Image (cartoon, grey):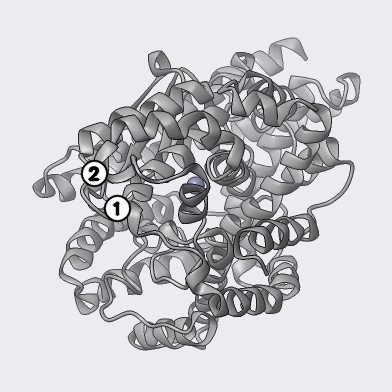
Amino acid sequence: MEKGIQKLKGLLAEVVDLQRSAAVLAWEQQTYMPPGGASARAEQLATLGGLAHRMFVTDEIGGLLAELEQSAGDWGYDSDEACLLRFIKRRYERERRIPTDLVAELARTTAIAQEVWVQARKAADYPMFKPYLRDVLSLRRQQAECLAPYDHIYDPLLDEYEPEMKTAEVRAMFASIKDDLVELVGTISERADAVRDEALHGDFDIERQRVFGLEVAQKFGYDLERGRQDEAPHPFCTHFSSDDVRITTRFDPTFLPSALFGTLHETGHALYEQGVDPRLARSGMDTGISLGVHESQSRLWENLIGRSRPFWRYFFPQLQAVFPDALANLDLESFYRAINRSAPSLIRVEADEVTYNLHVIIRFELELDLLTGMLDIDELPGAWNEKYQRYLGISPENDAEGVLQDIHWSMGAIGYFATYSIGNLLSVQLFNCAREALPNLDADIAAGDFDSLLGWLRDNIHHHGSKFTPRELVQRVTGGDMDARPYMAYLREKYSDIYDL
Ligand code: ZN
């Protein structure tokens, strides 16, 4: 048994090495690669992706998994070995059904599509991107078909990002919050004048923004000996091991919150990856378990900490010193309200906490319709604009502010968006547990001390990497299932206070 598990770990380590090497190339494509490098990079990513897949779905790994399963009862349920076996078996059974050629083709097509998306977004030119989107959608449909039978074609795609979650559950979750959110947006808009954010628009030197953002990130616990920050058109976090976890940011010299909260957000992702137990290195379990749980960490640091009063009690004087012209005459309370101003807007990543999930619901509904064939790619911008009008009462003037704003579809990430809302909901559920365990949390935060919170997150979430399914993890921490009610209660309380509702 010991020999078998060592053999399996050795084979998995090679697969993980190839995947992480591909991740380095993907990171470099979005940060430094000149546009001309795109087609060669697409081939490199297809080769590496195909190779990693081929080396994973072998009969040898299948045989080892079957053999080890015989003796799995000897391991405790929580042991690294038992968790590895469950985790890899699930992944193996899935990947084994997808042809390596399709994996490689997806890697190649999406690498090119991402480059075209960057250009198309710049030019607000949807027709430029459309044929590539058609190819990506077709490949993702083929992938889903390999994993049939399913209840909904979205299921196997969602499962890649949020293991075991079903489309029907996401629908039910959205149904339980959508009407309340639309109503809350309406109530706040009647009091729109109560909160102003003019002070956040102006002239904010990018270098100063970068320095301040990174200072906060380090204060949170982001270790720059094991991380770094670069610029990219769409902010993200990636990792090549828990000792090399990188974030990217996009700066706007005219609007302060954009890069600041973007940095806090990506730092939340990075803290998760840096906190994974080193014993899990190169096993494939050495990463966050799902995008929903990942997003719970980024949103926790970005919103529940970064947009809270205690946090700014500590950091606002420092921010004022960095931008005295813009902020010297602003008081803390006005600043707190300004960064929490809620108003319908077009760009998801910059949306406030109240409207954010409506951006996600729109994308989720469109993806379902695209996958089932109810909506054609030709009609997508029109359908996008119509939904923005219906849910948020606004519609974009061009496709760069509309259907072209997100990188996800060009990356093949269809089935991904729902995890943003799962993350929002979980962030509050998990934070409530942290609060209960740490009675001095607000005082710690107001003193600029995040050690107790990070320690709690490390012990309860980060450390486990992918050892437990999202459902198991939530159960272990909260004692129950994912629940939208704490999130809605949080929003209502916070915004009733800010807008005096
Ligand atoms: Zn995120």
Q: Which quadrant of the view contains residue 50?
A: top left
Q: Nearer the viewer, residue 132 or 355?
A: 355
| Image position, residue 151 (x, y; %) | 72, 72
Extreme residue in the front direction: 329
Looking at the image, do the residues carrying marks 1 and 2 touch, with CB atoms under 8 Å apart?
Answer: yes
| Image position, residue 334 (x, y; %) | 48, 51
Would residue 23 appear left or right of 173 to someone viewing this image?
left
Q: Nearer the viewer, residue 55 or 109?
A: 109
Q: Residues within 10 Å of mark 1 (few under 14, many from 20)?
A: some
Q: Pointer 2: what residue?
A: 204
| Image position, residue 179 (x, y; %) | 69, 79
Q: Return the mark for residue 79.
A: none
Please tell me which residue is depicted at 86% across the width and 23% down the height of the picture.
Answer: 71
Q: Is residue 451 above or below residue 496?
A: above
Please tell me which residue is depicted at 61% across the width and 59% down the height of the picture.
Answer: 498
Would residue 417 appear left or right of 425 to someone viewing this image?
left
Extreme residue in the left direction: 36
Q: Nearer the viewer, residue 351 or 415?
A: 351
> Where, quadrant-wise, is the N terminus in this rendering?
top right
Q: Amino acid at mark 2?
A: Phe
Q: In this view of the protein, can residue 128 be seen by the observer?
A: yes
> Where, quadrant-wise, is the C terminus in this rendering?
bottom right
Q: Pointer 1: what residue?
A: 255
Q: Any atom of ligand 1 within 8 Å of the CB at mark 1?
A: no
Secondary element type, mark 1: loop
Q: Amino acid at mark 1?
A: Phe
Q: Nearer the viewer, residue 180 or 379?
A: 180
